[in-house]
Image (cartoon, rainbow, N blue to C red):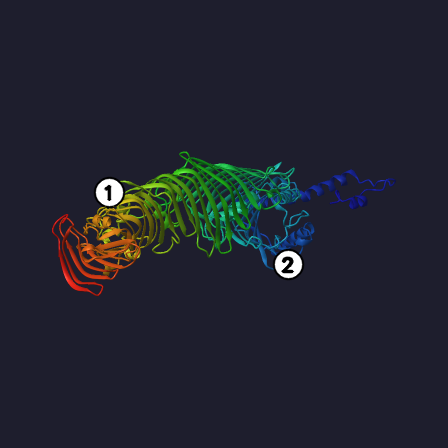
Amino acid sequence: EAATDPATADAVHPLPHAKPHRVPRRKRKHRRGRIWLIPSLIFLALGLTFAALALTGKQLRLPVWAVAEAEARLNTAINAAAGPEARGFAVSLGGGVVVVDDDWVPRLRLEDVRLLQPDGDTLLSLPETRVAFDPSALMQGQLRLRSVRVIGASMGLRRMPDGRWDMPLVLPVATRPTIGLSGLIASLVALFEQPAFSHLKLIEAQGLSLRIDDRMLNRKWLLGDGRLQLGNRDRELGVELSVSVMGDAGAAARAAVTLIAAKADASARMNFSFEHVAAADLAVQAAPLAWLGVLNAPISGQIASSLDASGTISALDATLTLGAGVLQPTPQTKPVAFDNASLFFSYDPKLEKLSLREWAVRSKNLALSASGQAYLPGVSRGLPQEVLAQIQINSLTLDQEGVLDAPVTFQQGAVDLRVRLNPFGIDIGQVSLTQDGVHLLASGQVEAEAKGWDVALNASVDHIAHDRLLSLWPESVVPKTRAWVAENVQEGQLSNIRAGFRFAPDAQPKFMLGYDYAGADVRFLKTLPPIRNGSGYAVIEGKTYTTVLEKGEVIADGGGAIDVSGTVFAVQDVTQKPAQARIDIKATGALTPVLTLLDQPPFAFLTKAKLPIRLGEGRVKASAVVHLPLHKDVKLPEVSYDVTGQISDFRSDVLVRGRRLEATSLAVKVTPEGMEISGKGRLQGVDFDGRFAKSFGPESKGISQVTGSADLSREAALKLGVSLPDGLISGQGRADLVLDMVAGQKPRLKLTSSLAGIGMAIPALGWSKPAGSKGQLDLTLTLGKPASVDRITLEAAGLRAEGKISLDADGGLARAQLSSVRLGGWLNVTAELQGRGKGN
């Protein structure tokens, strides 16, 4: 001490002008011998002590006063070196033991070492700490630490919501708790520069346990079974740490960190390997990994990174393998599951860019292989708020059993999207997928709302076969409409496909699909023939499905094509059970094929009317509005229909049996109540304007009726098979008629006329009626071969006659039985006229 202390040196050395006091040589030699004797004895005693401890293996326990003195000096040194925030902390030593191993290295084993907070609570507990000293330094009277080994260290840390730790670092540098990795490295470098630690080469720890309560991230971790090695090299610090990790979910994981830091500038190389670490735990380790926080899955892998002098990441390469997990940004959002995934990417902090060299995802529903790049704007200044990604899809297979008919594979594709991290959302700028020449484009938005997912997607396809469309149409999306399209749109090429999907919490999903089709076979009802070579467009919007047939034809069972262009099929609510359909049918074609179609179930119009399908000839242009439920075995009472149409160039020898019925144009109307055919025509060459009516009620089974007006003349009567005496009728007038037809019976015709325009005469009675006067004629006929006049009443020009007339096979008069004949005041008789053959 005298040799090193200036004050003592001044007191010992003589003044410059003072004459030194000389000691006799023999005395000086004797004193020198005594001076070297004391340290020699001390070193000899220490050497003998070390030798005895080393040879016997015995331990030398430090006395209590020595432990107390060491504790006091250590606390004094800590408070002197630490900043203001660390003052008040203290070290407690439970005891100490000195041991000399076989390698002659003295070691101090400290027991129950604790770092106490100002309030007396234990912050750090070290059950056993072993300190090894440099024996060569001890021989020179110096105390140098060579290594420190800690066993069973336990510590609890808490980070406050504002990011500050609730304890300061007690390292001999002026720093704050949020110094980061670079500050920690600088602190360790400064520690090893202290004289007492300058020769410390190794710090080891076994059985480490650490409890972290991070209130800023609202997460807790328990690190256990930790092993630490801190090596102090000439130019570098080397750290190896491995721990088991127990997160909030309770799943065990393992992590290992290797850090090589340069002492000169605190730059570092770090390698982080881990097994089964929770994605959320990994996301908070570095800002470029923050996007992993939306996943709930175990991750294994390795991250190699370089850090500059400020502790900022200068380069990063990561290989990650994810086990089975889900994408679930919030607890309320429905998890999107996957079986496994893998990522291999690098990070460029200058460009704030992730280079995604390989990305693979596999689940029950899909298999994806992709690469690309992503930008993390602002990540160099803190946590990123969004991810801008450009993904190149190498292959994508959709195979959701029970949802898709068969696996769908896209050979290539690209995705441009933005992922917003807080709150979570995805803006899909474009998805482009290609499959065997089919090009699919999509865009949309996905939001993780407080109550769940809010999804809005739009997609388009340039062209696709209808069965390929069904393979892309999930069965869970408007399943009834999909089932109808699958069953009834049998062939065809679809183009200009446009689809939209909307899904929001507490709301029914909305689906929109529109497409054009060509060359399609479409069936509206199972009982009706399909529409061949159809073209048009279809729209599904919300609960409504509509398809418009712009062009198409139906081949009826009886032969002949029916043009059904313009037909519209619509379902107002596809979710209704059963769904109710409306069919607006437009049909143009020959009469027989149209009647064949109308006689198919569930309609069977002609069968129920007891009319033949081959009712006649002509052309039909009809419109029909049909309402019916979409389920199997539809019954007629469930069907509502209203058919209107026009029959042109109509000819029939069947409708009025035994008579030819012709019409240039007839109007047709069919409802569940009955059928009507009306218009101007000719019955056996006799002009008429009438209406054919057939009721479908059970009380009218087999009954139909024709009403109207017709020409009345001798020629008309002859055409209808009624031969009248010459001169009885002349001129031409009109008569109202009612033709009743009952199945199995001859038609009955009722005819009435005012006789306007009709001249009449019976020369034998001297009676005549001018054509300019009126009268009344009522005639009831049974049509057949021959016809019969069941009742006749004539009243005109003073003549009144009643009776009935029978005709012979040629239509001539067989017998006329008149029950009353009155003429003026002079004739009131009954009469019977009997024909005498043709011409007589």
For the point 81% across and 44% down, which residue is it? Answer: 10
Above or below 357: residue 171 = below
Residue 206 visible within the image: no
For the point 56% across and 38% down, which residue is it? Answer: 353
Q: How many marks?
A: 2
Tell me which amino acid carries mark 2. Answer: Pro
Q: Please state the horizontal and vertical placement of residue 717, each as a whole percent of the image.
A: 22, 50
Q: Residue furthest right?
A: 17
* 546, 155: nearer the viewer: 546
Residues under labels 2 and 1: Cα distance?
104 Å
* Quadrant in the picture for the N terminus: top right
Disc 2 + disc 1, Cβ < 8 Å: no
Q: Please state the horizontal and vertical placement of residue 476, each as a whole percent of the image.
A: 38, 49
Between circles 2 and 1, the one closer to the viewer is 1
Q: Please state the horizontal and vertical placement of residue 498, each as a whole percent of the image.
A: 45, 43
Identify the residue under disc 2.
Answer: 118
Mark 2 Cα shell of 10 Å, populated few (<14), some (14-19), many (≥20): few
Of the residues under marks 2 and 1, which one precedes in the sequence? Answer: 2
- Asked whether, in this view, residue 694 is left or right of residue 512, the answer is left
Mark 1 Cα shell of 10 Å, populated few (<14), some (14-19), many (≥20): some
SS at mark 1? Answer: loop
Q: Please state the horizontal and vertical placement of residue 751, each as a whole percent of the image.
A: 25, 56
Tell me which amino acid carries mark 1. Answer: Gly
- Quadrant hosting residue 675: bottom left
SS at mark 2? Answer: loop
* 232, 674: nearer the viewer: 674
For the point 67% across and 54% down, which residue is it? Answer: 85
Numbered circle sitting on residue 558: 1
